[in-house]
Image (tube, rainbow, N blue to C red):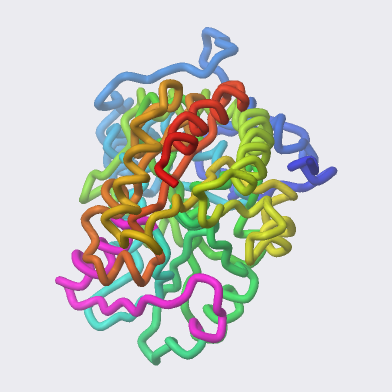
Amino acid sequence: MMSNIPPELPIEKAAPRGIPRVQLPPQVRRDTVAVREGLPPSAWGENSEALFLTSSFVQPDAATAAARFANEEEAFIYSRFTNPTVTMFERRLAALEGAQACIATSSGMSAILLLGMGLLKTGDHVICSRSVFGSTIRLFAGEFGKFGVETTFVSQTDPAEWRRAVKPNTKLLFAESPTNPLTEVCDIGALAAVAKHAGAWLAVDNCFCSPALQRPIEYGADLVIHSGTKYLDGQGRVIAGALCASEQLVNDKFVPVMRSAGMSLSPFNAWVVLKGLETLSIRMQAQSARALQLAGWLEAQPHIERVYYPGLASHPQHQLAMAQQSGCGGAVVSFIVEGRQRGGAALARSNAFHVIDQTQVCSITANLGDTKTTITHPPSTSHGRLTEDQRQAAGITQGLIRVAVGLDDIEDIKADLHRGLSSLAS
């Protein structure tokens, strides 16, 4: 497995605006950044980052308070939009993604909401992969649509279809890579070229890979979206989100919305995810290695129609994934149990439920990115609120099972799945 750390890779930082930074050597590598970027210690000299549980911050005098509220001076004011612990998380994640700036949110979906509220207006057009997370489809098609923003859904993997979808009012292209749950990989560089030609922004949801395996900005993306709930935390403890971009985009487009709308990340959750970033690289490497073992094993099992995992040579975008994802396939494996050909969707669903219900180690939950391996049935959970037409367009069939591989012994996970697969009726 390839290392995820290019040698001597410089990390772009925005110019300081009043709040000091940790002083690190300019060519420090990313694994060091993952444990040290943020704010300098307080006067007490703590080695582990402090948790600032306060709603507001006392100002030295009225004039200073006025200047800070007018955004003439960067400082901590009110934890809805400025908090030291949240700032430490934002700076660290931005550095890991190779972005100038980051703004943290209360969840991954609130990061996408902030994206839309900051960049879009009535009459604008969005192009979005039809294979993204179910709630993302509903947000673009439903909630943004109510305010006059039109969204065209296209193939995740066909850049020509993205080009054909461009309109004079296209403002945003949005993709996940890999997608949830079929692990489809988009050519980020090709989509960046489409966006640039259209005068639009490209946003990439990097939830499945995290910056440990993939950094979309290096391939031309303008914005990177995260559900910090997943691999950034890595232990299923808190809900969090983030949006990484240039300093200008963050300060001009997103900070004003955050100050008014308040979809902010709590300091405690920020502190938990900040500490999660310290082990992100080693977790992603270990979980990816286990996932590759599981995917190869699943391909050899009876009662399985297809396995979806970018690390497999059989994956349609395998070569692209290996190039964009630092040689790793990530930690999510999806597969389809047989049944459609003999009994249609009802039998496929019944067989999928049987396999899931026979597990004794895997956690039956729709969350992913945990140290514990999780298993779910996407058609009835993560994509359950979509219409059947939307599910079919996204390739979400009733026999589909998604496994997010954790740090369990992979032989135990194989045995867990074998219990259900081996007891399916022939």
Q: Is residue 17 magenta?
A: no
Which sits in the foreground, 367 or 263? 367
* Residue 144 lies in the magenta stretch: yes
Q: Residue at x 30, y 46 (%)?
A: 350
Horizontal and vertical percent position of residue 374: 43, 32
- The answer to whether 329 appears left or right of 361 in the picture is right
Residue 16 falls in which quadrant of the image? top right
Residue 121, can we see it? Answer: yes
- Residue 198 x %, y %: 50, 85
Query: Residue 96: in sight, yes or no?
Result: no
* Image position of 14 (left or right of 326): left
Q: Residue furthest right?
A: 7
> Residue 152, percent across and down?
34, 79
Residue 60 point in image, percent of width and height: 33, 25
Q: Residue at x 55, y 14 (%)?
A: 48
Work out whether residue 193 or residue 130 is closer to the camera in this orientation and state it: 130
The residue positioned 58% from the left and 62% from the top of the image is: 185
| Screen quadrant of the N terminus | top right
Asked if residue 149 is positioned above or below residue 198 in the image, the reply reads above
Q: Residue furthest front?
A: 426
The answer to whether residue 142 is above or below residue 398 is below
Query: Farthest left residue?
Result: 146
Task: Please tell me which residue is depicted at 38% across the width and 24% down the height of the picture.
Answer: 237
Q: Residue furthest top?
A: 44
Give the extent of the magenta segment: 133-162
- Of 353 and 40, nearer the camera is 353
Q: Is residue 349 left or right of residue 321?
A: left
